[in-house]
Image: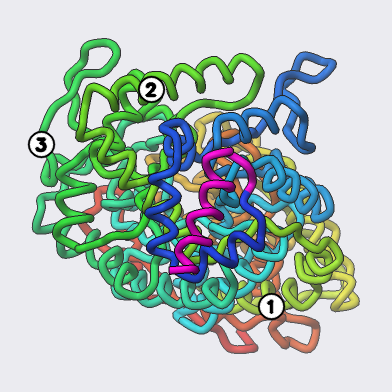
């Protein structure tokens, strides 16, 4: 009884006065977490409860002296007041916010210091490979690369490295792993973010990743329920429709979610996709067009399947609500209300909090939800339920606002040990898809290599690592580079023939080809006529060879750039290209620099999709001599 009285006094002083809850108070709350969560919610104002349901991004704040959006890197009074006065429960950080370890630690410490009550969830998307947020950090080669290794221990290692680095910086939730099954070769948004098109491999690797990250105090969130793998458009800009029937969905998309939920997943992120087989109801867009109901707004999907059928009682987090699929089609206040009613607990990025004017929109959203909750008992119930679920998870996870130790973080993040492990993993992922007596290319004392791709920075990255190989092996590599838009039809034989002359080897680096890439094919044809060895490096998705003819050698590296698709912000995935290039060459003693070990984690089909050209599990090796 005495403990309960102390608990009640602790809650009244911490919550009703909207003061930050101290570590000493948290220690008391953690002793009876269920009871504490109930008491906290009972003592909260409506605004405080709503605040726990929002995760906002402050990617920029106002403009710089040139009139460009100014990245939000250091806490300012305006943002601090937003976090405190709107009782914000969560913040997500992006690449724009994260310059280096000292700046990241300071920013996260400042964010936590601005809270009004409970510690904040501080989240990011450090999936690895294609989606990475830390500018200084260990990315790891990505999910499909892990799929190519077939090694669950490496997935666990990836989770451990991500967890160790993120937790040392002050993050407490990572939006991953992706458990979407990439069963559509033309998927523009998932691709190498998926482990595989094989559901069993997705199950195995995703749960091992969770096992690894859980060694540190970090939550995970599965992406993207009910499954984003079988789409041909991107929900960042469109509203995709999945036309699988229910039986297909239950046999392919559902199992990895179900398996991961049974093996320790903490949260589930929704997908802004329409799945008529699961919810055939119609709603109207802002223009009056009738469309299907996206999963993020669907009660039959979020409550009916995820809550009732799967008996899931963890956090449901929306994908970013400012993505085109939602923001371009629906009134945002209505969409937030509808998603809460459907079963969501945390609304991710319902407003771009990028400037002072956004505060008015945020205030209007709070007032709207408060007003609607008074009129609608179901909405009020949902707000209360979700606030309690969020708070309980914070208490169960023992989330703290204690300042992060910079010195400790600097010893951990992007350490040499982590970077060496990153290279070890990527070396095992490189997959030789085709090799007609081209690989390994035995380096001579003097080598002339032509590098071709769509982008100069990509060429320069390849040249950088060719120079490293030359230094290591004691040879000379004279590399030239040309930029050609490989998917276009602008070249003639006369254009390309002189550029190939006198070259010993051509590296043609492709990036998600489709349809009929004329320029790429002309280069391949002219190289074959001139009897110059050419290697196609599929630098992102491994499917490019399906759209080319007469390729003599092809490798898949599963990513050459990390890409923040929400803001067109790129970074180089150096480990993937490093290991890919090393797989091409043998030294002058004919010893390969990296023996290929990767196996395709997907089927590569013909463009029509009715024939498998290279099956799941395929991967060539080579002997040390031709």
Classify mark 2: helix, strand or loop: helix
Asked if the magenta segment contains residue 140, the reply would be no
Q: Is residue 427 above or below residue 387?
A: below
Mark yes or no: residue 536 visible: no
In screen coordinates, is 413 left or right of 146? right
Q: Is residue 150 above or below residue 506?
A: below
Task: Provide the residue span drawn in magenta.
Answer: 1-20
9 within the magenta span:
yes
> Where's residue 187, x and y in %?
36, 47
Residue 135: which disc?
none
Observer-side mark, 2 or 1, equals 2
Q: How far apart are marks 2 and 1 (CA)?
A: 44 Å
Marked residue nearer the N-terminal end (3 or 1) = 3
Residue 332: mark in rendering: 2
Residue nearest the observer in this picture, 80 or 164: 80
Quadrant of the frame with the C terminus? bottom right
- Residue marked by disc 3: 280
Q: Considering depth in this image, is 196 or 18 the residue closer to the camera? A: 18
Q: Is mark 1 on a helix, strand or loop?
A: helix
Marks 2 and 1, the one that precedes in the sequence: 2
Identify the residue at image location x=73%, y=31%. 71
């Amino acid at each position: 009884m005495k403990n309960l009285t102390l608990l009640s006094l602790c809650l009244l002083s911490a919550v009703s006065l909207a003061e930050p809850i101290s570590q000493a108070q948290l220690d008391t709350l953690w002793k009876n977490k269920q009871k504490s969560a109930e008491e906290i919610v009972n003592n909260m104002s409506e605004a405080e409860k709503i605040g726990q349901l929002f995760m906002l991004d402050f990617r920029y704040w106002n403009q710089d002296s040139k009139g460009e959006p100014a990245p939000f890197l250091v806490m300012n009074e305006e943002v601090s007041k937003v976090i405190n006065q709107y009782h914000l429960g969560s913040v997500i950080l992006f690449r724009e916010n994260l310059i280096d370890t000292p700046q990241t630690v300071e920013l996260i410490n400042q964010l936590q210091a601005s809270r009004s009550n409970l510690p904040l969830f501080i989240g990011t998307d450090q999936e690895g490979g294609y989606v990475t947020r830390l500018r200084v950090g260990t990315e790891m080669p990505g999910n499909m690369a892990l799929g190519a290794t077939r090694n669950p221990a490496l997935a666990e290692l990836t989770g451990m490295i991500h967890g160790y680095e993120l937790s040392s910086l002050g993050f407490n939730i990572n939006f991953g792993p992706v458990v979407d099954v990439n069963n559509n070769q033309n998927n523009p948004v998932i691709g190498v973010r998926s482990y595989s098109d094989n559901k069993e491999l997705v199950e195995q690797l995703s749960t091992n990743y969770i096992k690894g990250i859980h060694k540190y105090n970090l939550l995970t969130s599965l992406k993207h329920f009910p499954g984003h793998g079988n789409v041909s458009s991107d929900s960042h800009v469109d509203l995709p429709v999945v036309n699988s029937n229910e039986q297909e969905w239950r046999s392919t998309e559902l199992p990895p979610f179900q398996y991961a939920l049974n093996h320790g997943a903490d949260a589930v992120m929704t997908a802004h996709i329409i799945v008529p087989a699961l919810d055939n109801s119609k709603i109207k867009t802002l223009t009056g067009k009738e469309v299907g109901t996206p999963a993020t707004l669907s009660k039959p999907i979020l409550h009916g399947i995820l809550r009732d059928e799967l008996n899931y009682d963890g956090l449901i987090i929306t994908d970013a609500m400012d993505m085109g699929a939602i923001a371009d089609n629906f009134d945002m206040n209505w969409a937030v209300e509808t998603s809460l009613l459907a079963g969501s607990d945390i609304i991710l990025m319902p407003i771009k909090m990028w400037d002072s004017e956004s505060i008015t929109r945020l205030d209007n959203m709070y007032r709207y939800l408060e007003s609607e909750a008074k009129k609608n008992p179901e909405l009020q119930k949902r707000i209360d339920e979700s606030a309690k679920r969020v708070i309980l998870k914070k208490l169960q996870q023992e989330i703290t606002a204690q300042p992060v130790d910079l010195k400790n973080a600097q010893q951990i993040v992007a350490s040499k040990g982590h970077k060496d492990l990153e290279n070890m993993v990527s070396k095992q992922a490189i997959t030789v898809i085709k090799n007609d007596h081209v690989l390994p290319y035995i380096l001579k004392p003097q080598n002339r290599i032509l590098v071709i791709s769509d982008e100069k920075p990509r060429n320069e990255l390849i040249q950088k690592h060719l120079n490293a190989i030359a230094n290591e092996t004691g040879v000379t590599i004279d590399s030239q580079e040309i930029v050609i838009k490989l998917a276009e039809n602008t070249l003639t034989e006369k254009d390309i023939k002189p550029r190939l002359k006198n070259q010993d080897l051509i590296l043609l680096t492709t990036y998600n080809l489709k349809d009929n890439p004329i320029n790429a094919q002309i280069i391949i044809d002219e190289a074959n006529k001139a009897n110059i060895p050419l290697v196609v490096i599929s630098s992102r998705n491994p499917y490019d060879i399906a759209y080319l003819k007469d390729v003599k050698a092809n490798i898949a590296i599963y990513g050459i750039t990390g890409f923040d698709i929400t803001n067109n912000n790129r970074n180089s995935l150096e480990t993937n290209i490093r290991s890919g290039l090393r797989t091409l060459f043998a030294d002058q003693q004919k010893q390969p620099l990296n023996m290929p070990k990767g196996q395709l984690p997907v089927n590569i089909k013909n463009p029509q999709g009715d024939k498998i050209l290279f099956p799941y599990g395929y991967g060539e090796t080579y002997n040390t001599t031709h």
